[in-house]
Amino acid sequence: MTRLPRLLAAGVVLAAVTALSACAGTVSMDAAPNANDPACADVSVRLPQTIAGESRRWTDAQATGAWGDPSTILLTCGVAVPGPSTLSCETVEGVDWLVDGTDAPFYRFTTFGRTPAVEVYLDFDVVGSADTLRAVSPMLARQLAETGSVCTDRPATDG
């Protein structure tokens, strides 16, 4: 093989690798039903570049965010606003969050008493909920309208 064909072959391989690596960073997600709410656009443009040491990545769905490689934190704006729930509820930086640990160590946190609602899904083996929710809650408190619903204390049950 002469030098020119080898250079051309190397160039084609390099171009293919570059094209593939550019796509590898995009996280495939689904947009929520209310992702087109203007408040979700306000949220999307204010998402932090890092959360709990994890860098933000591109996503392919409206009003979403992802951090980590592989993704350890996923955020979706425009999910259904939750009604009354028996799930645990925590308040972080002025935002109430319903906590669903059904898929532990993957946890789903959904804003409560805010519209549109935001969901954060995270891998608790890699990142903690406190750091994650503290990173997004102040911004969400400013961007999402309150519905009037708030977390309430639940009576302890004897078991």
Image (cartoon, grey):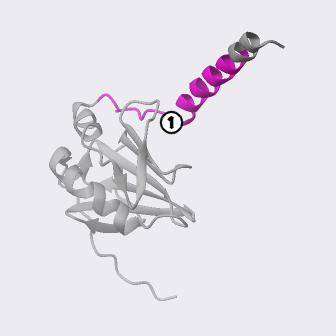
Q: How many marks?
A: 1
Residue 26 in sight? yes
Q: Secondary structure at mark 1?
A: loop
Residue at the outermost bottom position: 158
- Image position of 89 with respect to 143: above or below: below
Residue at 63 percent of width and 24 percent of height = 14
Image coordinates of residue 2 in percent, x first then y, are: 80, 12
- Image position of 101 with respect to 49: above or below: below
Magenta-drawn stretch contains 26 = yes
Dot 1 crowding, Cα within 10 Å, few <14, some 14–19, many 20+: some
Image coordinates of residue 10 in percent, x first then y, are: 69, 21
- Image position of 81 with respect to 90: above or below: above
Magenta-drawn stretch contains 35 = yes
- Which corner quadrant of the image does residue 95 belong to? bottom left
Q: Which residues are magenta?
A: 9-36
Residue at 19 percent of width and 53 percent of height = 141
Residue 88 in sight? no
Out of 75 and 34, give the one closest to the viewer. 75
Image coordinates of residue 34 in percent, x first then y, are: 34, 33
Image check: 25 left or right of 61?
Answer: right
Residue at the outermost right position: 1
Image check: 12 left or right of 133?
Answer: right
Instruction: Identify the image quadrant of the N terminus.
Output: top right
- Image position of 56 with respect to 25: above or below: below
Out of 103 and 87, give the one closest to the viewer. 103
Q: From the image, tell me which residue sits under label 1.
A: 29
Image coordinates of residue 73 in percent, x first then y, are: 46, 53
Q: Amino acid at mark 1?
A: Met
- Which corner quadrant of the image does residue 125 belong to? bottom right
Residue at 29 percent of width and 45 percent of height = 47
